[in-house]
Amino acid sequence: MLVVASVARYSGVVRIDTWVAVAIVAALFMLMVTLAGLMLGGAVVARRRTQALIQGRLAELWEVVRSALDLPEDASKTFAVISVLPIPVAFIVPPAVGTVIFIVL
């Protein structure tokens, strides 16, 4: 992204004022990717901890408890899916916003 911005700047396509916009778009992109990665890492840890607790004899105990109390199932798969969704958004939205800013400015 910086290479494209540098080429655009030296070719005269982009004014200096747009560097602020480029920095904002790049910062938002990095923030979204970082947050998605952190959420995905949290989902992995939650899944591993849940699986470790349910193995062996605890699995039998949980079956008895679930049948008696009707407790909810493990939600780590849903959390993982939700945590992965910001990744494509981070790869599509900031470049699109940057393109619109370059066209408008």
Image (tube, helix red, strand yellow):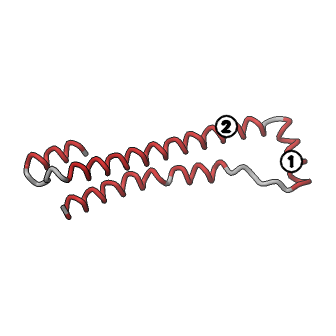
- Residue named by callout 2: 48
Quadrant in which the C terminus is drawn: bottom left
Q: Secondary structure at mark 2?
A: helix
Q: Quadrant of residue 69?
A: bottom right
Q: Residue at x 89, y 54 (%)?
A: 67
Q: Secondary structure at mark 1?
A: helix
- Horizontal side, residue 19 vs residue 91: left or right: left
Q: Amino acid at mark 2?
A: Arg
Percent across and percent down for residue 45 are 63, 37
Percent across and percent down for residue 99 are 25, 58
**Badge count:** 2
Label 1 Cα crowd, 10 Å radius (few <14 / some 14-19 / many 20+): some
- Horizontal side, residue 77 vs residue 90: left or right: right
Percent across and percent down for residue 25 are 32, 51
Q: Residue at x 78, y 39 (%)?
A: 54
Percent across and percent down for residue 10 are 9, 45
Residue 1 sits above or below residue 97 on the image: above
Q: Compute the Cα span from label 2 to label 1.
A: 19 Å
- Horizontal side, residue 56 vs residue 64: left or right: left
Q: Residue at x 14, y 49 (%)?
A: 8
Residue 41 sits above or below residue 66 on the image: above
Which callout, 2 or 1, points at the residue further toward the start of the chain?
A: 2
Q: Amino acid at mark 1?
A: Glu
Q: Give the farthest residue toward the bottom.
A: 104
Q: Residue at x 20, y 53 (%)?
A: 18
Front one among 87 and 30: 30
- Residue named by callout 1: 63
- Tell me the number on the disc at residue 77: none
